[in-house]
């Protein structure tokens, strides 16, 4: 398929990575006005008590309309320590957490100023771990009408129906307790399935 438009995302969900591998080219949006309560600064994981949302704190923009690429990470709350502690608690017993631990731990020790930079460095690392190589470019202007637009539709609340994505069930640590949780953060898939994660992505793509 041709070009897909995506937002930036923090530890994006499985659906997002399916888009990265099913399109010939990817445009990640840098020129949109920032939207709150989206995957741009949060992700969903499976914890002992069920689905848990973790969010990167951001500074309130000085103007009502602020480009996503200009959103700064708030330097308070010790969020990096809390995020890493939460990931360890949720996935420490998963089959592949120790395998990938050293790849992710540095992100929770180094300081990042901009949300977009953190998200992209995480995405690049994850693509390398998945051994996928999407053709990604960043937008230089905001185009309202594009054919394959998932900038808003991939979202935590009331996501738009996507007939090209049917989550393929895979092993999750707490599946016997809670059942299968579809379309969580890509780290849920990586920590539970390891090198087979890319195959799960392919199995979740429909034509």
Image (tube, rainbow, N blue to C red):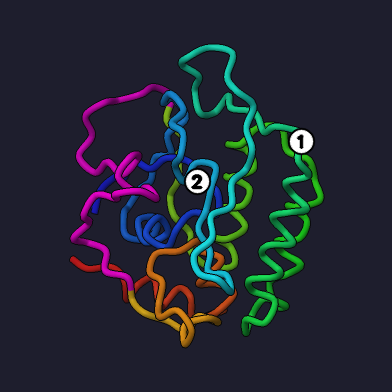
Above or below 154: residue 167 = below
Report the front residue among 123 and 79: 79
Which quarter of the picture shows residue 88?
A: bottom right
Quarter where residue 146 is shown: top left
Q: Quadrant of the C terminus?
A: bottom left
Give coordinates of residue 54: x percent, y percent: 58, 52
Foreground of the two, 85 or 132: 85
Instruction: Name the residue carrying label 1.
Output: 76
Name the residue rendered at 63%, 47% in the picture. Answer: 121
Q: In the figure, is residue 132 to the left or right of 110?
A: left
Asked if marks 1 and 2 touch (Cβ < 8 Å), the reply is no
The residue at the point 67 percent across, 82 percent down is 93
Q: Earlier in the sequence, mark 1 or mark 2?
A: 2
Task: Please state the horizontal and vertical placement of residue 114, each as a whole percent of the image.
Answer: 65, 32
Of 37 and 10, the residue lying toward us: 37
Residue to which mark 2 is pinned: 9
Which structural element holds mark 2? loop
**Image location of residue 130, percent across then percent down:** 53, 68
Q: Which residues are magenta?
A: 140-167
Q: Quadrant of the N terminus?
A: bottom left
Is most of the magenta stretch helix, strand or loop?
Answer: loop
Magenta residue check for 32: no
- Quarter residue 41 falls in: top right
User: Cα distance, mark 1 to mark 2?
Assistant: 21 Å
Q: Is residue 206 left or right of residue 9?
A: left
Front of the two marks 1 and 2: 1
Residue at the outermost top position: 63
User: Would residue 164 be counted in the magenta stretch?
Assistant: yes
Residue in the picture at 74% in, 49% down: 80
């Amino acid at each position: 398929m041709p070009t897909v438009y995506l937002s930036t995302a923090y530890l994006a969900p499985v659906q997002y990575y399916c888009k990265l591998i099913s399109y010939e080219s990817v445009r990640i949006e840098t020129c949109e006005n920032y939207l709150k309560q989206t995957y741009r600064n949060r992700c969903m994981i499976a914890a002992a008590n069920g689905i848990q949302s973790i969010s990167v704190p951001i500074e309130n923009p000085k103007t009502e309309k602020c480009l996503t690429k200009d959103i700064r990470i708030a330097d308070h709350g010790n969020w990096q320590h809390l995020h890493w502690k939460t990931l360890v608690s949720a996935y420490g017993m998963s089959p592949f957490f120790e395998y990938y631990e050293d790849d992710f731990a540095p992100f929770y020790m180094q300081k990042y100023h901009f949300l977009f930079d953190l998200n992209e460095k995480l995405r690049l690392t994850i693509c390398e771990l998945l051994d996928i190589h999407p053709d990604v470019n960043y937008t230089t202007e905001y185009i309202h009408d594009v054919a394959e637009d998932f900038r808003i539709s991939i979202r935590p609340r009331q996501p738009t129906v996507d007939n090209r994505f049917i989550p393929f069930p895979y092993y999750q640590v707490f599946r016997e307790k809670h059942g299968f949780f579809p379309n969580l953060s890509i780290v849920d898939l990586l920590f539970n399935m390891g090198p087979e994660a890319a195959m799960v992505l392919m199995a979740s793509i429909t034509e």
